[in-house]
Every structure is written in structure tokens, then in C-alpha cells.
Amino acid sequence: MRAVSGVWRWRHNPLRRATDRLEAWLALVALLLMVLAAPVCGWLCGVVTDGALQESVRAQQAQRHVITAVVVRRVPGASNLAADPEVSSERTTRTTVLARWKAPDGTPRRDTVATSSRVTEPGSRVRIWTDRQGRAVLPPMDGTTARTHAALAGFGVTLIGVGLIEAGRRVIVWRMVQRRYARLDRDWAESGPDWGRTGTGS
């Protein structure tokens, strides 16, 4: 911001260097990009991500179904687990059990599944999610979780964009400073040996 204010303050300063004005304009352009371009890129990323995730939500909801399974036994050593944050925005308690059920074609199946049912004694009936082949799967992602992930993705892209813009600005300023020092070294090398001598114009 100090460099941006320099665009106005240094406009009539007799000690102003061309690089000072260029650095101030560079800071102003970088600020505008951070305020305008980076959020727009983040918004576009969020929109695209949300569209893809919502399509995935619809596909999962069409391919996964709730069925009733019978608990064989609780899995030894398994503790209560929180719901997968990639699937649901709700933090419901889930218990891991060994259950049996039948696939749509009548094939008996048995697998370790996680259930939110509080009754998990052997012989209890619990609701689980399966795919079209009758295999146990995680619950489908819900729309709210998809929107949350899309918003986080857009916010992340915005932050990355701001960081890249600032990094680019710093690199350009660093190169400008290096060239300024190199030019001073050349000027000093030319006039330094004669500095202060009579008749040299100093």
C-alpha cells in the first residue's frame, strides 16, 4: 500500500526515479489483480467444482440404495466412528459391525459395515448402503457437503491467486532493485577513481 500511495506522492518529487514510479504502478496493478482477478478466479473454480460435485451426488444417489442387514456380531476392538466428512455434513456416531444381507440377485453377502443404529446386538436389523451389485458402500454425498467442498475450493484458489500475484510482484521488484544496484556500481566504477580530484568536474 505504501508503494501504491507513492503513485500520487511522488508525481512531482524531483528526487523521484523512474523505477520508483514503475514500482508504485506495479503495486497498484498487483492490488487490483488481488481485489478483482483472484476472487473472480476463485468464484469460477467454485462454480465448476460445485457443478462436478453435484453431478457426482446425483450419480451416487442413483447408484446407492438403503437395505436392511442382520448384525452377525460387533467387530472386536472397533470403536464408535464419526461419519465420513467426505460423504455427509452431519457428524453422526457410527458403529462397525459384521453384517449379512442379500444382493439384488439373491446372492448372500457378508461384510464389515458401519451403521448409525444404536442397537447392534447379534440378530439386530440395521440399515446399510449398497451399490447395484449389493456390495456395502458409504452413504452418498449430500448436496450441502458438495457445496461446502466447492466453496472451500474456490476460497483456496483465491488465496493461491493472491499469493502468486504477490510473489510475482516481489520477484519483479527484486529484479528492479538488482538492476538499480548494478547501474550504481557501474556509475561509481566510472566516476569513483576521479572523485574529488581537481579538474575532474567534481
Image (cartoon, rainbow, N blue to C red):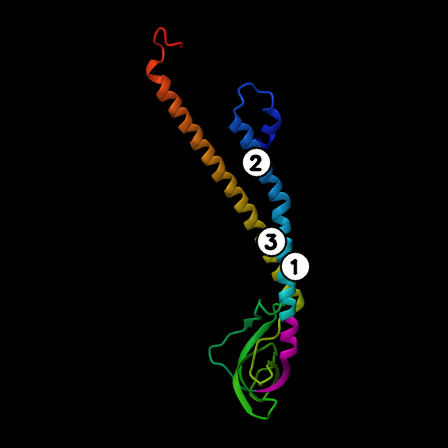
Residue 191 lies, in percent from the top left, at 37, 17
Instruction: Identify the residue under disc 2.
Output: 27
Is residue 158 in the magenta section?
no
Residue at x 54% of width, y 22% of height: 16
| The image quarter in which residue 117 lies | bottom right
Task: Specify the label residue 83 is tagged with.
Answer: none
Marks 2 and 3, how far apart at CA: 23 Å
Crowd around label 3: few <14 · some 14–19 · many ≥20 (10 Å):
some
Residue 114 lies, in percent from the top left, at 56, 78
Q: In the orientation shown, which residue stands out farthest toward the top? A: 198
Instruction: Identify the residue under disc 1.
Output: 47
Question: Is any atom of residue 168 visible in this view?
Answer: yes
Marks 1 and 2, how far apart at CA: 29 Å
Q: Nearer the viewer, residue 88 or 57?
A: 57
Badge 2 marks a residue whose secondary structure is helix
**Of the two numbered discs 2 and 3 in the rendering, the one whose residue sits closer to the viewer:** 2
Residue at x 41% of width, y 24% of height: 184
Q: Nearer the viewer, residue 88 or 146?
A: 146
The segment highlighted magenta reads 57-70
**Considering only vertical position in the picture, is 55 above or below 135?**
above
**Considering only vertical position in the picture, is 84 above or below 37?**
below
Tag count: 3
Question: Is any atom of residue 89 visible in this view?
Answer: no
Instruction: Identify the residue under disc 3.
Output: 155
| Quadrant of image for the C terminus | top left
Crowd around label 2: few <14 · some 14–19 · many ≥20 (10 Å):
many
Q: Earlier in the sequence, mark 3 or mark 1?
A: 1
Q: In the orientation shown, which residue stands out farthest toward the bottom? A: 106
Q: Earlier in the sequence, mark 1 or mark 2?
A: 2
**Considering only vertical position in the picture, is 132 above or below 83?**
below
